[in-house]
């Protein structure tokens, strides 16, 4: 029961600024879901808080717009309850690299099967223009009058270090390529990061569409081997001059849910919920006698 | 004079010396002989050293509380003797290894009965050095002339996994120490323990164990938690039963992740909970509001300990009451249950999951260190698995989902505030909802009429839930002059105080705390002077009672040193009232 563009259409009109990178991301996500043949009821999109985290309102699929920084653990709970659902998290750079940094690292090392879409515009948009954990050093905003003083968080490098098994980067200005990356992430067994470079046309006057277009290039055009973690890490460190896009790294190791033996009998969510059997009760009582 | 089956036994030592396992083993042996017991654990926040004790009060009739007076002390080192001997009554026995630096004559001069036993020597001779605790238990059983066979049963059971030789060696050690101590000291020791013939087999368990049993009986199939005393044993118990009961347990990276995982699992349709203490609960507060706002069922178990901050990590307090009632920004419905006994812990376990799904909102079960870790014997039927009901409220079944027409409204406005609930996975009930204010469909909305309706809808659920909130339970003569008012774990000590006050006092014990059973409270508390007893400084329950009922509380008794109330604390305070 594959979805069509019409199936994923929402009646809600996005509140995003004209030209916002989120439009490209939304289109790419819809396209990817259709490409892999999933229907809206098979998908669960968990977002955080921020401009981009309003995305579940703008797509017809199961969704939960949650708390700033917390979509990953919520998605993890949903995934452990029902591994039959394709669980996708959507959140920004403030959400994922600020409050959610810990959860992000743990999701990667846990290798739980979640597609993690990080909309990285290097700025806080919804709160109107403060620097973010991924802002380039020296980036001047209302809360960094002397320029950002910290090194920028690097989601790709962090995911690689934490044991991520699918690590990719796309660009909101190239939705077709992005859709392919998201489709590959959806088909990956395990935690799959797609960092999405996303211009904020209102508050980020540095990292614009033009700025990105001058720098981005496709890893697949360079003969990069996505099986080589060290090479992936080297590529992850490139920034400012040239910015690589595409699949940095992919490997296969058992997912978290594959290792939980109770889940091998099927999802908890679809099992009938029944009272304990008399035999189970007797066993439990005997434990305390 | 001989006193049979009414005594308190205490084993004390450093962390790591096996105080807990020895105490639990002895408790089992007593329970197998048909005796009732109440086991109190007192331990420090450290892995080695310090002073821990496990106290077992024993009687033929059911016990609900500990008592301070100790009749037989087993100090495993000198510090334990120093730290605990003040609790030993005149004539009480002290069993210790004869190599401890203890002056027998001084002890005797202080009115104690010193009972040195070559525990280590016996262990070495008949088994191994590490079996000295077995020797101590054997000696204790010998002095009180309790059935050696019952102790042997427990040794066989507890060491079975270590193999036949270990069992045999422990039995030899226990037997030798039993005979040694009985021969030398039993004749002059007043307190005796005897099996109760024909007594039924009973269960021995803690509040946390009872809650976990209730939870799984009530359909809990997922728990996420971050270890925190005194709640840790909940996830540990469930983790041990993953296969047996089909549970998934997740030790999360922090408490925020734990509650979020439980919310995610509940959203996806699995009965899920998180367990923590006050510090972890503090971290969970924002997500608590998320569950309230988005109408996600959620069970949260909070075992209180001494606060604020790290406070007294291994000790008891009831100081999170007003915090859990008000935690998280904004207004949303929540239910708060505070069990007071092992039986109530079990019942709250399954009830909480029904309430959470029925009202599609957080249910907080508030326990504390005393209830969490103290052991009690109860009749097997007292944990009534037959009475357990699994009521999923307005959760839509397959046929109802198939029959849906039109867009599914997750937050449909209804008279009782409860909306038919679908979980993700059905083609006819695809929806997204938001922690932002939302409309019936779950879409973000700031429109003011919608806002009013949604606030009213959510809060209406609290009014609907009020119908099934349990009234306080009453114990003791209705005409008593003093009304002891308590909640949660003080039940046991207050009940015993009522028994000892010969009609002077009665008890009104609150279990369901929110929505507050105001009308039932006003009725139950009519007549008599109110004495509110609670383990906190600011009188949190008293303030709640006063604000919800307009009753004036005359007297209070508070304790906030991390230790549970003793019966004497209550009796003394009642005497002060001069009734």
Image (spheres, coloured by chain):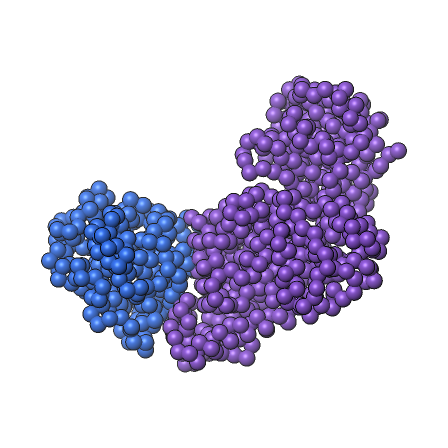
Q: Nearer the viewer, residue B66 or B176?
A: B66
Residue B531 percent across, percent down from the top left: 73, 56
Q: Which colour denotes chain B?
A: purple
Q: Nearer the viewer, residue B549 or B328?
A: B549
Residue B268 percent across, percent down from the top left: 45, 63
Quarter of the picture holding the C terminus of chain A: top right
Q: Residue sitting at 78 percent across and 26 percent down?
A: B110
Is residue A175 something that shows in the picture?
no
Count of labels shown?
0
Is residue B487 something that shows in the picture?
yes
Q: Residue sitting at 15 percent across and 59 percent down?
A: A212
Considering only vertical position in the picture, is A173 above or below B560? below
Examine the image and state in which quarter residue B94 appears: top right
Q: Residue sitting at 75 percent across and 50 percent down?
A: B573
Q: Which chain is blue?
A: A
Residue A165 appears left or right of A209 = right
Considering only vertical position in the picture, is B295 above or below B490? below
Residue A206 percent across, percent down from the top left: 17, 59
Residue B228 appears left or right of B381 = left
Quarter of the picture holding the N terminus of chain A: bottom left
Residue extending farthest to the right is B1
Examine the image and state in which quarter residue B50 appears: top right
Residue B541 percent across, percent down from the top left: 64, 58
Q: Residue sitting at 64 percent across and 71 percent down?
A: B467
């Amino acid at each position: 029961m594959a979805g069509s563009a019409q199936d994923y259409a929402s009646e809600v009109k996005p509140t995003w600024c004209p030209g916002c990178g989120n439009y490209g991301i939304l289109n790419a996500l819809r396209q990817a879901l259709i490409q892999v043949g999933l229907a809206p009821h098979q998908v669960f999109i968990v977002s955080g808080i921020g401009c981009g985290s309003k995305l579940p309102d703008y797509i017809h699929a199961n969704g939960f717009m949650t708390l700033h920084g917390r979509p990953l653990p919520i998605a993890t709970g949903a995934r452990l309850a029902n591994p039959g659902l394709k669980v996708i998290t959507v959140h920004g750079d403030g959400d994922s690299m600020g409050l959610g940094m810990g959860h992000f690292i743990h999701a990667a090392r846990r290798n739980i099967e979640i597609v993690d879409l990080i909309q990285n515009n290097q700025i806080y948009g919804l709160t109107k223009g403060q620097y973010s954990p991924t802002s380039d050093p020296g980036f001047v905003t209302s809360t960094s009058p002397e320029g950002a003083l910290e090194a920028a968080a690097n989601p790709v490098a962090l995911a690689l270090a934490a044991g991520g098994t699918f690590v990719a980067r796309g660009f909101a200005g190239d939705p077709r390529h992005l859709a392919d990356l998201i489709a590959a992430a959806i088909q990956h067994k395990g935690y799959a990061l797609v960092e999405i470079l996303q211009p904020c046309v209102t508050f980020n006057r540095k990292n614009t569409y033009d700025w990105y277009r001058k720098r981005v290039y496709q890893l697949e055009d360079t003969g990069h081997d996505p099986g080589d973690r060290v090479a992936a890490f080297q590529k992850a460190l490139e920034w400012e001059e040239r910015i690589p896009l595409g699949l940095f790294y992919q490997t296969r190791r058992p997912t978290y849910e594959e290792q939980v033996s109770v889940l091998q009998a099927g999802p908890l969510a679809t099992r009938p919920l029944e009272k304990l059997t008399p035999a189970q009760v007797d066993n439990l009582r005997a434990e305390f006698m | 004079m001989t006193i049979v089956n009414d005594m308190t036994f205490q084993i004390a030592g450093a962390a790591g010396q096996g105080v807990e396992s020895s105490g639990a083993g002895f408790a089992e042996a007593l329970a197998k002989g048909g005796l009732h017991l109440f086991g109190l654990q007192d331990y420090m926040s450290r892995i080695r050293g310090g002073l821990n004790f496990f106290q077992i009060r024993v009687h033929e009739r059911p016990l609900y509380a500990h008592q301070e007076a100790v009749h037989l002390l087993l100090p495993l080192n000198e510090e334990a003797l120093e730290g605990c001997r003040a609790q030993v009554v005149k004539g009480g026995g002290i069993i210790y290894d004869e190599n401890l630096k203890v002056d027998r004559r001084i002890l005797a001069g202080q009115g104690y009965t010193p009972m040195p036993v070559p525990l280590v020597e016996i262990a070495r001779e008949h088994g191994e050095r590490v079996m000295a605790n077995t020797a101590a238990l054997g000696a204790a059983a010998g002095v009180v002339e309790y059935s050696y066979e019952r102790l042997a049963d427990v040794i066989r059971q507890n060491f079975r996994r270590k193999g036949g030789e270990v069992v045999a060696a422990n039995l030899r050690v226990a037997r030798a120490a039993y005979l040694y101590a009985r021969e030398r000291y039993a004749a002059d020791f007043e307190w005796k323990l005897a099996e109760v013939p024909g007594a039924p087999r009973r269960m021995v368990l803690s509040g946390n164990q009872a809650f976990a049993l209730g939870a799984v009986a009530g359909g809990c199939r997922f728990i996420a938690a971050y270890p925190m005393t005194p709640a840790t044993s909940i996830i540990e118990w469930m983790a041990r039963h993953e296969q047996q009961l089909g549970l998934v347990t997740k030790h999360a990276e922090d408490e925020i992740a734990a509650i979020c995982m439980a919310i995610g699992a509940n959203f996806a349709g699995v009965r899920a909970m998180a367990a923590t203490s006050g510090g972890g609960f503090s971290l969970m507060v924002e997500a608590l509001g998320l569950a309230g706002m988005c109408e996600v069922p959620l069970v949260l178990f909070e075992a209180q300990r001494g606060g604020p901050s790290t406070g007294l990590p291994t000790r008891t307090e009831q100081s999170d009451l007003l915090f859990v009632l008000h935690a998280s920004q904004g207004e949303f419905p929540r239910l708060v249950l505070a069990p007071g006994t092992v039986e109530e812990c079990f019942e709250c376990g399954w009830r909480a999951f029904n309430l959470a799904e029925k009202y599609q909102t957080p249910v907080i079960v508030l326990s504390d260190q005393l209830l969490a870790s103290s052991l009690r014997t109860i009749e097997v039927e007292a944990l009534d698995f037959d009475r357990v009901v699994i009521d999923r409220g307005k959760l839509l079944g397959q046929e109802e989902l198939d029959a849906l027409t039109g867009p599914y409204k997750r937050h449909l406005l209804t008279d009782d505030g409860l909306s038919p609930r679908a979980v993700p996975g059905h083609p006819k009930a695809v929806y997204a909802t938001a922690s932002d204010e939302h409309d019936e469909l779950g879409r973000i909305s700031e429109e003011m009429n919608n806002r009013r309706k949604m606030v009213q809808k959510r809060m209406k659920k609290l009014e609907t839930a009020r119908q099934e909130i349990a009234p306080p339970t009453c114990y003791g003569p209705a005409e008593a002059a003093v009304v002891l008012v308590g909640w949660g774990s003080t039940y046991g000590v207050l009940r015993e105080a009522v028994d000892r006050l010969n009609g002077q006092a009665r008890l009104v014990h609150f279990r369901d705390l929110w929505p507050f059973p105001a009308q039932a409270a006003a009725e139950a508390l009519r007549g008599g002077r109110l004495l509110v007893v609670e383990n906190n400084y600011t009188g949190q329950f008293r303030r709640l009672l006063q604000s919800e009922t307009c009753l004036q509380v005359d007297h209070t008794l508070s304790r906030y040193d991390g230790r549970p109330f003793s019966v004497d604390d209550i009796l003394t305070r009642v005497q002060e009232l001069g009734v």
